[in-house]
Amino acid sequence: MAGRAYEGSCHCGAISYVYRTAVPVSQWQVRACQCSFCRTHAALTTSDAAGSVEFRFDRPDDLHLYRFALKTADFVLCRNCGTYLAARITTPKGSYAVVNLRALSRLPPELPAAQGVTYDAESPEDRVARRESHWTPVLGVAAGPA
């Protein structure tokens, strides 16, 4: 996958990701989900169905996967420092993730304003289908040790 690599990690360095996309930052779709989990974490997320994301677990025991609400995705958190890094889903079609831009080592200055989004009207099946078609494919192990 051609494009630029953007690195993110939790505060303590136990978990990190590399998000690769050919989409210029000024054209990223930045979302501010309005669910209570994302609002509490002040999450700003993005994804690129033509990009890739790869996770690294320097301290696998610090990985915490949390299933919120409909339990259709795993929220990737650091057990040690509490950082929310991404949400991921694994289906028969593959593994996909949306990354939390707040975990980037540096927020790009040309980052567009976030658009508030809600997914409350989606059925679990619709939610999975949207994620399979819009979220970023995960390379390697989907979310590290289970």
Image (cartoon, rainbow, N blue to C red):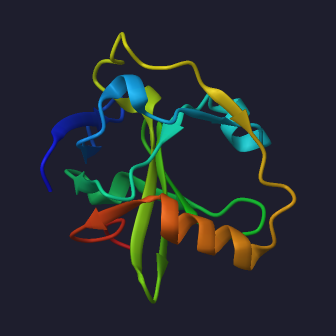
Q: Give percent across and percent down for residue 105.
A: 28, 23
Going by the image, does 11 lie left or right of 125?
A: left
Q: How many numbered discs sit on the rendered protein?
A: 0
Q: Give percent across and percent down for residue 52.
A: 27, 56
Seen in the picture, residue 2 relative to 93 is either above or below; the reply is above
Farthest residue, direction left: 2
Q: Is residue 82 visible?
A: no
Seen in the picture, residue 137 relative to 16 is either above or below; the reply is below
Indicate the quadrant containing the N terminus: top left, top right, bottom left or bottom right: bottom left
Of 106 and 83, the residue lying toward us: 106
Q: Give percent across and percent down for residue 111.
A: 42, 19
Going by the image, does 57 lie left or right of 132?
A: left
Indicate the quadrant containing the C terminus: top left, top right, bottom left or bottom right: bottom left
- Identify the residue at horizontal 71%, vertical 31% (top origin): 40
Seen in the picture, residue 27 relative to 17 is either above or below; the reply is above
Farthest residue, direction top: 109
Of 3 and 128, the residue lying toward us: 3
- Identify the residue at horizontal 24%, vertical 56% (top origin): 54
Tell me the quarter of the picture where residue 19 sits. top left
Farthest residue, direction right: 121
Seen in the picture, residue 87 relative to 16 is either above or below; the reply is below
- Identify the residue at horizontal 68%, vertical 68% (top origin): 127
- Identify the residue at horizontal 71%, vertical 43% (top origin): 37
Q: Give percent across and percent down for residue 79.
A: 46, 47
Farthest residue, direction bottom: 92
Tell me the quarter of the picture where residue 104 sits. top left
Q: Is residue 63 visible?
A: yes
Of 92 and 15, the residue lying toward us: 92
